[in-house]
Image (spheres, coloured by chain):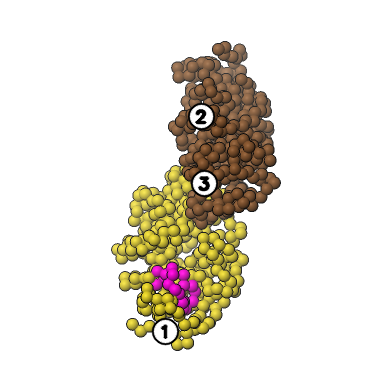
Chain colours: A brown, B yellow
Amino acid sequence: MLLQIPDEMKNTKVILANRPKREIEDSNFDVIIEELNEIKDGEILIKIHDISLDPAIRGWMNEGTTYIKGIEIGAVVRTFSAGQVIQSKNSKFKEGSYLSGLLGAQNYCISNGEGLTPLDISNSKISHHLGILGMPGMTAYFGLLKRGEPVSGDIVYISGAAGIVGSTVGQIAKIKGCTVIGSAGSDAKCKFLIEECGFDYAINYKTEDIDQQLKKFAPNGIHIFFDNVGGPTLDIALLNLARGARVVICGAISQYNDMANIHGPKNYMKIVSARGKMNGIIVFDYVEQWPAAVKEIAEWINDGKIKVKEHTIFGLENFSSALKMLYTGENFGKLILNIGS
Amino acid sequence: MLLQIPDEMKNTKVILANRPKREIEDSNFDVIIEELNEIKDGEILIKIHDISLDPAIRGWMNEGTTYIKGIEIGAVVRTFSAGQVIQSKNSKFKEGSYLSGLLGAQNYCISNGEGLTPLDISNSKISHHLGILGMPGMTAYFGLLKRGEPVSGDIVYISGAAGIVGSTVGQIAKIKGCTVIGSAGSDAKCKFLIEECGFDYAINYKTEDIDQQLKKFAPNGIHIFFDNVGGPTLDIALLNLARGARVVICGAISQYNDMANIHGPKNYMKIVSARGKMNGIIVFDYVEQWPAAVKEIAEWINDGKIKVKEHTIFGLENFSSALKMLYTGENFGKLILNIGS
């Protein structure tokens, strides 16, 4: 295998220039080119192939610490990325091998290997390890199974269902014998949910009344609500809980651009009358169980039980315009920025 | 025992004249006097002694069904009341015996006995069976123990702590080895929490900054938040959750007067980052376990481990003015309307 090592050892990277007040703007980022240092003992040089564009990035751009520290001004934008080791002075990482981790939005990354995950790409696409076999897939798997506690026959409603997390939750719920309802923002996405992902019902939230449709599809209420969206969508779901319902908060994409004025769920008392509970999923809590989950999901994919949809944008220069698509719902499938194979 | 049977068999009762839009007003109620029917086979005539004024009544005055149907216009106002059987054509209920139940805001009640609880008042005050030995005490007991899952060493924060539910939760939490923080609306109430109820810390929410005080008393966060108040108080508590915290929603007294514009907890995502959960307590779910709980609490009272405070108003004509005290925090202790011994 011929490894492509840069002649001049220059790296192009996207840095955080300033913090967005609400929506992400192109001016929040700078693209800079810098000399790459020689790697030291214990380090590896990684050539990045694919960058994962995830909703979580917007939160990381805020100041302060939530479950993880905000990105510093001037630092490379934190992203999950996947690439190949092209130089290694660390015996744990062989040149030519593939890995993923928080490598950032850049062409090259020098790392001591800490926190990186080796990838077996013999039976899978590299980019899948940033999606269904990576953090989003793990979020779906552990969020549904550990926090939603599905039982065969349960009715599961998923908001933001056409995203990588939502579509994976729904497909795993189908495997577990549940009836699955998803909401998404276009007829094409709804068609994808029904025809490719095997959902039982889909709701186009832009043209249909979610409350009305939920009452039609689940007249006795929903047992699990898996929420990627927050805001009014969460409030509507709370009106439709079955007794003992589990509300799994995964994300709140509708709220991330204005965290100071977040829409709290005014129907939260419905959790009480439904004898339900609201909890959430932090995927890092299950990191030791990721390898087994990756194996199980890969088998489901190979058996044709789970379908994956990717939306690929090319070129590091398109980082911010691609990232913004997440918050407008323009992307259709897991959003990947490919910066070279 | 000489039972007082009314000569003319007239009953005075408080009925719902119309529904409040926001705050309860005197004009929402009418007091009417009506003939009492003769009791039929299977029925009993109860002379009511004490009426419990509970926050839940405001919710019952709304139209529609939540966990229980709203009071009909023209019907006697639903309340928990306690009294004595003065005529019985039901072999299960002896004349002279005491009982409690949803007997309503009236002097007399004719009942078939369904849903009524016999009271043993040999070692307890009748009115205690409407408070610490009745629904509020049961709410505290099962809400804390079943839904809050306290472990010795936990830090428990209770809002509306000087009320009958809050003060009972705190005292049971102390018995279970927890550190207890309560918030209430006056220095006198805070003094009561510390000096009589044995709370570790008290916060006067009208003069102190709850967030600041919680950070001082529980710098590593609270393990259980038992919420009687809702609104901004809930939001502040969510900022102070320890890892794995349980948020037990019992009530939202700050919100009941304007349910259309309820303040949803905008910090609900903190439940996710704390790996916590939010659930609630519906006391009727534990009705089969009430007798054992009553026995245990009565022992704690007799052993001096739990203190009870009552605030008694006299006369059915004061029903609405007494009820309104609940929402302004004017009452200090379990609010009881005594209408004759």
Asked if residue B13 lies left or right of residue B154, the reply is right
Q: Quadrant of residue A107?
A: top right
Pinpoint residue B10: horizontal percent, then vertical percent.
Answer: 49, 84
Picture quarter with the N terminus of chain A: top right
| Three-letter amino acid code at the position of disc 1 | Ile
Label 3 sits on residue: A154
Q: Circle 1 sits in a helix, a strand or a loop, which is it?
A: loop
Provide the residue designation for mark 2. A299
Q: Which residue in the rendered view is the most extreme toward the right?
A: A207
Q: CA distance from mark 1 to mark 3?
A: 56 Å
In this rendering, the answer to whether B78 lies above or below A181 is below
**Quadrant the C terminus of chain A occupies:** top right
Q: Badge 1 sits on which subunit?
A: B
Mark 2 crowdedness (10 Å alpha carbons): few <14, some 14-19, many ≥20: some
Pointer 3: residues within 10 angstroms few (<14), some, or many (20+)? many
Residue B19 as seen in the image, left or right of residue B249: right
Q: For the residue carrying disc 1, how many other residues have a C-alpha within 10 Å: few (<14), some (14-19), or many (20+)? A: few
Residue at (48% x, 70% y) in the render = B79
Q: Which residues are magenta?
A: B98-117
Residue B5, disc: 1
Secondary structure of residue under mark 3: loop
Q: Is residue A150 magenta?
A: no
Give coordinates of residue B154: x percent, y percent: 39, 49
Q: Quadrant of residue A157?
A: top right
Q: Earlier in the sequence, mark 2 or mark 3?
A: 3
